[in-house]
Image (tube, helix red, strand yellow):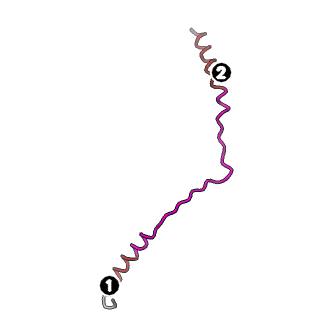
Protein backbone atom coordinates (compact mmCIF):
# COMPACT_ATOMS: atom_id res chain seq x y z
CA UNK A 1 0.00 0.00 0.00
CA UNK A 2 2.89 2.31 0.73
CA UNK A 3 4.29 1.74 -2.75
CA UNK A 4 0.92 2.59 -4.32
CA UNK A 5 0.83 5.93 -2.48
CA UNK A 6 4.36 6.72 -3.61
CA UNK A 7 3.55 5.88 -7.22
CA UNK A 8 0.41 8.02 -7.05
CA UNK A 9 2.36 10.93 -5.54
CA UNK A 10 5.04 10.69 -8.23
CA UNK A 11 2.39 10.60 -10.97
CA UNK A 12 0.64 13.65 -9.54
CA UNK A 13 3.92 15.56 -9.30
CA UNK A 14 4.85 14.52 -12.84
CA UNK A 15 1.49 15.80 -14.07
CA UNK A 16 1.56 19.08 -12.14
CA UNK A 17 5.25 19.96 -12.64
CA UNK A 18 4.96 20.96 -16.33
CA UNK A 19 2.05 23.26 -15.50
CA UNK A 20 4.12 25.23 -13.00
CA UNK A 21 6.02 26.99 -15.81
CA UNK A 22 2.86 27.97 -17.68
CA UNK A 23 1.65 30.52 -15.16
CA UNK A 24 3.46 33.86 -15.16
CA UNK A 25 2.57 37.24 -13.70
CA UNK A 26 4.01 40.37 -15.21
CA UNK A 27 3.51 44.03 -14.44
CA UNK A 28 2.10 46.04 -17.34
CA UNK A 29 4.49 48.21 -19.35
CA UNK A 30 2.14 51.21 -19.19
CA UNK A 31 0.40 52.50 -16.08
CA UNK A 32 -3.22 51.57 -15.58
CA UNK A 33 -5.46 54.54 -16.41
CA UNK A 34 -8.94 54.84 -14.96
CA UNK A 35 -11.04 57.59 -16.47
CA UNK A 36 -13.92 58.85 -14.35
CA UNK A 37 -16.37 61.33 -15.80
CA UNK A 38 -18.36 62.67 -12.88
CA UNK A 39 -20.89 65.45 -13.20
CA UNK A 40 -21.33 67.59 -10.09
CA UNK A 41 -23.48 70.23 -11.77
CA UNK A 42 -26.69 69.24 -10.02
CA UNK A 43 -25.15 69.46 -6.55
CA UNK A 44 -23.64 72.89 -7.26
CA UNK A 45 -26.93 74.23 -8.63
CA UNK A 46 -28.81 72.85 -5.61
CA UNK A 47 -26.41 74.53 -3.20
CA UNK A 48 -26.66 77.82 -5.07
CA UNK A 49 -30.46 77.59 -5.15
CA UNK A 50 -30.59 76.92 -1.41
CA UNK A 51 -28.22 79.80 -0.71
CA UNK A 52 -30.19 82.12 -3.01
CA UNK A 53 -33.43 81.25 -1.22
CA UNK A 54 -31.88 82.06 2.14
CA UNK A 55 -30.47 85.34 0.83
CA UNK A 56 -33.85 86.38 -0.60
CA UNK A 57 -35.60 85.57 2.68
CA UNK A 58 -33.05 87.55 4.70
CA UNK A 59 -33.18 90.55 2.34
CA UNK A 60 -36.83 90.66 1.32
CA UNK A 61 -36.79 94.46 1.00
CA UNK A 62 -34.19 94.31 -1.78
CA UNK A 63 -36.05 91.71 -3.82
Total labels: the figure holds: 2
Front position in the image: 44 or 2:
44
Pinpoint residue 53: horizontal percent, then vertical percent.
Answer: 34, 80
Which residue is under mark 2? 14
Badge 2 vs badge 1, beta-carbon distance below 8 Å: no
Front position in the image: 9 or 35:
35
Give the answer, above or below, for where 45 lies relative to 15. below
Pinpoint residue 3: horizontal percent, then vertical percent.
Answer: 61, 10
3D distance between C-alphas at marks 2 and 1: 84 Å
Asked if residue 54 lies in the magenta stretch, the reply is no
Q: Residues within 10 Å of mark 2 (few under 14, many from 20)?
A: few
**Label 2: which secondary element:** helix
Reading the chain from its start, which is encountered first: label 2 or label 1?
A: 2
Residue at image point 31% right, 91% down: 61
Of tags 2 and 1, the one toward the viewer is 2
Q: Residues within 10 Å of mark 1 (few under 14, many from 20)?
A: few
13 left or right, relative to 42: right
Front position in the image: 7 or 15:
15
Which residue is under mark 1? 58
Residue at image point 46% right, 68% down: 40
51 left or right, relative to 25: left
Residue at image point 64% right, 35% down: 23
Look at the image and give the residue range highlighted in magenta. 18-47
45 left or right, relative to 17: left
Amino acid sequence: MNAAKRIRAVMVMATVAPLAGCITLEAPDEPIVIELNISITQEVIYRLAEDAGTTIDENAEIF
